[in-house]
Image (cartoon, rainbow, N blue to C red):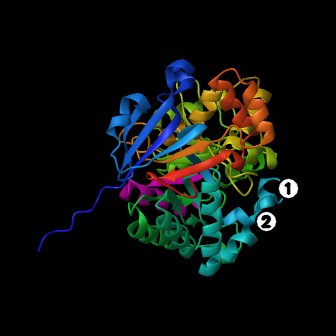
Amino acid sequence: MNATVSTPAITAVRGHLVSLRDNPFVVGDTAAMWAEPDGLLLCRDGKIEAVGAWRELRDQVPENVEVVHYDDALIVPGFIDCHVHYVQTGIIGAFGKQLLEWLENDVFPTEQRFADKAHADVVAKLFCDELLRNGTTTALVFAATYPVSVDALFEEAERRNMRLIAGKVLMDRNAPDALLDTAQQGHDDSEALINRWHGRGRLGYAITPRFAITSSPAQLEAAGALWKAHPEVWVHTHLAENRGEIEAVAGLYPDRSSYLDVYDHHGLVGRRAMFAHGVHLHDADFRHCHDTGAAIAHCPTSNLFLGSGLFPLHEACDPHRPVHVGLGTDVGAGTSFSLPTTAGAAYQVAQLRGHALTAPQLLYLATLGAARALDLDDRIGSLEAGREADFTVLDPHATPLLDFRSKQAGSLDEVLAVLMTLGDNRAVRAAWLAGQPTGPL
């Protein structure tokens, strides 16, 4: 009997291609940016096979493949959200408190609903819909303490062939009893989820202590032992978000020299460790992150919404010892699923700290910089041959105001800046996952 030979899935997309090739905070905008005003992405079996000028590559398109042409739009790498809570989707915009009170009054009651798999399924679908509607093709996600909350999200992401990283929250103290696990249970549940989901399709697992306040030393030790046993997975937690939080951590861990040292002492700092916020970190912390490869998710809309502070992005990205930084929406404290909106907020935060950001720098934080922060830049984050074919199509004319403003722009950088100032999900004309459109062309 003859073996069945599958036909390769080939797609071709034409338009104005824009991508980063390097870190503009280090090498400058001109050296970092790459653009092709009339470009072609030729995709085969979920990866970019060829990328370049249409005039040079058009003959490589098979005769039976229809070219999808996005005229008068920008095709950029799919956006990457480095920190978001899918289980907090239902409390986005719940205002009136700072971090610790907000957790107690809004977050913890909401997350208890995710013990119900049916509820988790509904929210996971809405969450993934919102990511893609906003052009986000990869995300690092907090679930709840319940393993079924992780299963629901991974099932939904797998159905869509999304690259997504998530984990069960570890929390064994200072929270409602219904949300608590134990050090051993958290370890065992996490290991079972790693074995079930990590590396399955485009999915990855993150060991996920909520933060040092809600994890005992025993639980952080167990988390560190789990990472040592599974170094291929990620660590995802919160760090130095709020001054009251920092004071509470210092009281709980008096023998540690800093908040970051709490995690370091328990073996939770290194490459593939992502720390959300880092608003109140200092130079020694940044230097340690640089030396170890640990990354920070900058979440400006969340930090503004909860009054947490202004992240020192300029200091973190010091070219003499740059830290890996990517943008995070941090929904539900964050107020938008849109990474362009988040980038606009990052610009404003930097202005308040006395530093101006450029459009290439902001695009970097949402794409290649985020991919580097997640140690995935060999797979996603740029429009290059061999990368996974995840990309987002941005329409500078999506609204009357965007259209009017974009027509006044004198450069590509200005168009990008306008999209990050005025753009939201309406500016996303399409999002593609693994070489396939996720909605109408």
Residue most extreme to the front: 63
**Viewer-proximal residue, 249 or 117?**
117
Q: Quadrant of the N terminus?
A: bottom left
User: Is residue 13 magenta-colored?
Assistant: no
In percent of width and height, residue 47 lies at 38, 47
**Apparent side of residue 217 relative to residue 408 in the rendered image (left or right):** left
Q: Looking at the image, is 31 positioned above or below residue 390?
A: above
In percent of width and height, residue 305 lies at 80, 48
The answer to whether mark 1 and mark 2 are in CB contact below 8 A is yes
Q: Where does label 1 land, which residue?
A: 97
User: Is residue 232 magenta-colored?
Assistant: yes
Q: Looking at the image, is 31 positioned above or below residue 379?
A: above
Residue range corresponding to the magenta coloring: 216-238
How far apart are labels 1 and 2 at the CA level?
10 Å
**Viewer-proximal residue, 284 or 316?**
316
**Viewer-proximal residue, 426 or 317?**
426
Residue 214, visible in the rendered structure: yes
Q: Earlier in the sequence, mark 1 or mark 2?
A: 1
Residue at 42 percent across and 72 percent down: it is 192
Say what secondary structure mark 1 lies in: loop
Residue at 47 percent across and 65 percent down: it is 158
What amino acid type is highlighted by mark number 2?
Asp
**Viewer-proximal residue, 357 or 374?**
357
Say what secondary structure mark 2 lies in: helix
In percent of width and height, residue 222 lies at 47, 62
Residue at 75 percent across and 36 percent down: it is 403
The tag on residue 106 is 2
What amino acid type is highlighted by mark number 1?
Lys
Number of callouts in the render? 2
